[in-house]
Amino acid sequence: MNVSQTKSAIPLNFTEKGNGTLSSVSGSQRLSFENIRSFRQHFEQGTIPMRFALGDNQHQTLIVAMYEGTEKLLNQDVSEFAVLEYLEGLKLTAKELRQQGISGEQFRTSLLEHSASTVRDLVSSS
């Protein structure tokens, strides 16, 4: 039996430093700008294939929701796993909204509200 190994879009417990090297980070610590920047870059790269399925406007809303959410997580005591879970949930919610036929302003409002609610929950539980 062969087990294929998949590579995560965002490496757990590692973040990129300004010089391109990876450094180990503990599971729960204040999220620095460098941590957030790395999450953002990987998220944007990971959503490129979704652009066609979502459409340009909904994809842009997804990116805006991610930036607003990660901005609120800056300097908070939130684990990297929790941030990854938030970002994956954001992508999943965008897909689900689109599959339900929701678009335009309703898509934007729903996704931004979901993002803000999830971030509030993360911050309050940390």
Image (tube, rainbow, N blue to C red):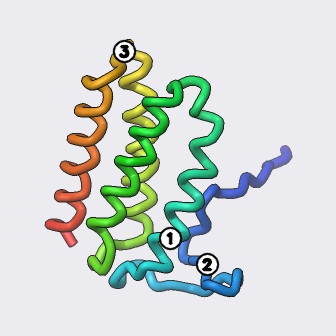
| Image: 78 above or below 116 | below
Query: Which three-letter amino acid code belongs to the residue tagged 3?
Result: Gln
- Secondary structure under the numbered disc 3 in the rendered image: loop
Whether tag 2 and tag 1 are in contact, CB under 8 A, the answer is yes
Q: Which mark is residue 37?
A: 1
Q: Which residue is mark 2?
A: 16
Q: Which mark is residue 90?
A: none
Give the percent coordinates (x, y) of residue 26.
Answer: 46, 85
Q: Earlier in the sequence, mark 2 or mark 1?
A: 2
Report the side of 48 relative to 87 (left or right).
Answer: right
Q: Residue at x 80, y 49 (%)?
A: 4
- Which of these two is toward me, 95 or 1? 95
| Image: 47 above or below 67 | above
Q: Residue 123, located in which quarter of the rendered image?
A: bottom left
Q: Which residue is mark 3?
A: 100
Whether tag 3 and tag 1 are in contact, CB under 8 A, the answer is no
Query: Which three-letter amino acid code belongs to the residue tagged 2?
Result: Glu
Q: Residue furthest left?
A: 124
User: In the rendered view of the protein, which quadrant contains the C terminus?
Assistant: bottom left
Query: Which three-letter amino acid code belongs to the residue tagged 1?
Result: Arg
Q: Residue furthest right?
A: 2
Distance between the alpha carbons at the discs numbered 2 and 3: 36 Å
Q: Residue at x 36, y 84 (%)?
A: 29
Q: Residue furthest top?
A: 101
Distance between the alpha carbons at the discs numbered 2 and 1: 9 Å
- Which of these two is toward me, 2 or 63? 63
| Image: 126 above or below 87 | below
Q: Residues within 10 Å of mark 2 (few under 14, many from 20)?
A: some
Give the percent coordinates (x, y) of residue 118.
Answer: 24, 51
